[in-house]
Image (cartoon, coloured by chain):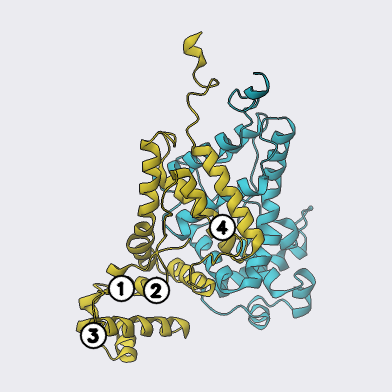
Chain colours: A cyan, B yellow
Amino acid sequence: MSAPHSEQASGRSRGPGRPRQDDISDRVLDAVLALIDADTPVTVNAVVARSGVSRAALYRRWATLPKLVAAALDRGRSPIELPEGGSALETLERIAPQPGDDVLAGYSEARLRQRLRLGLADHAVQREYWESHVSRRRAPVTAELERGRRSGEIRADIDPEIVQDLLAGMYYYQVVVRGEQLQSPEVIARCRAATTLIREAIENRAPRPDRAPHRQR
Amino acid sequence: MSAPHSEQASGRSRGPGRPRQDDISDRVLDAVLALIDADTPVTVNAVVARSGVSRAALYRRWATLPKLVAAALDRGRSPIELPEGGSALETLERIAPQPGDDVLAGYSEARLRQRLRLGLADHAVQREYWESHVSRRRAPVTAELERGRRSGEIRADIDPEIVQDLLAGMYYYQVVVRGEQLQSPEVIARCRAATTLIREAIENRAPRPDRAPHRQR
């Protein structure tokens, strides 16, 4: 659930002295979030009026309004940091939040619920958020699962995308259907148990006597 | 994802001649859905005005407004029908939708998205929906998984609630995060692959030589 602030999507470039472009992006993203928080429809006109940034400058940074809204909603999310060393399966368990962890990595639960609501109401924003933010954020975990497959640690027939859907889906289900708080120790324990179950499911246990013995008989 | 229309929650009683009480419940639930569809806040006054049913009659059927809203949002959802015969693990695979199935069992995708949105905006409605509808709907599947545990078919350490969170979470993730349509053949295939993975994970393969041999050495 923890996730990177996409530099590409927010139009930031890091350099000495924090260039002016940064300030413009910040002002625009602040304006979008302020409109969302005030339950005001996010239109280009409203963003221009509130941020004082020109329409042209705005479109130079974000080609479409859904791209801009998605970037604003992603603000404050941090990248998944994969631990150094260890097997791919160990990585999977290590990145699962533990009791006491900041499950949302700085992102607030209120913002998460708001983002999901806006996505459900506006399919273009939802798809943009998926394509520019969530799917990119998943890439390092996909790579890690692929590494595990190559090393023979993870079953060759496992699809990393399905593994990630299952794991992330577990967390989303707590928020979206159960109406739980992700910080709750009970929820963290439930999600960790799910992670362990998935880990066991994808582990390559071959050569396993109950799979291969028939050839030897 | 398919799910029962809770008779209890909607206040229906089935008998000959379709008693008048039925019509009253229908009128009220219709009124709530009409307000939701018109993006009008659902208040008791608005429901009374629109349905023509008295405040007292309304409160006799639903003790609170969240209970009423949850009942309205659950309208049209049908129960999970467990197939007769077969093992618990087979049941799990059989109830997973196949290509061509009506995944939402009569419920519409638009209503699903709307329900999730309203739940994310109103925690009381969300919790009510979970307690009066979703958690009840899951009960037969929980019982089926328990049956599998008792018969030794499913691992004794498996928690049926976690299995259901994972499976249902997979479907919700498609809608809520990926922004996909549940009817899409690709989505159905992905969710079926996830179900198979979970089935393999919970299957009791003991006595398995790679688990128990140390004692024998």
Q: Which residue bears the numbered disc 1?
A: B10
Task: Tell me the element at label 2.
Answer: loop
Q: CA distance from mark 4 to mark 3?
A: 41 Å
Q: Is residue A185 visible?
A: no
Q: CA distance from mark 2 to mark 4?
A: 22 Å
Q: Residues within 10 Å of mark 2 (few under 14, many from 20)?
A: many
| Amino acid type for the residue under numbered disc 1 | Ser
Residue B117 appears in view: yes
Badge 2 or badge 1: first in the primary sequence = 1
Residue B126 is situated, as x and y percent measured from the top left of the image, at: 39, 65
Q: Is residue A74 above or below residue A16?
A: below
Task: Return the chain for callout 4.
Answer: B
Label 4 sits on what residue type? Tyr
- Answer yes or no: are tags 2 and 1 on the same subunit: yes
The residue lying furthest to the top in this view is: B217
Residue type at the position of mark 3: Arg
Q: Are marks 1 and 3 in contact (CB under 8 Å)?
A: no
State the image coordinates of residue A63 (x, y, percent, origin top left).
Answer: 77, 72
Is the C-beta separation of discs 4 and 3 under 8 Å? no
Report, in whole angstroms, how far the alpha carbon at label 2 lies from the one at label 1.
8 Å
Residue holding disc 4: B173
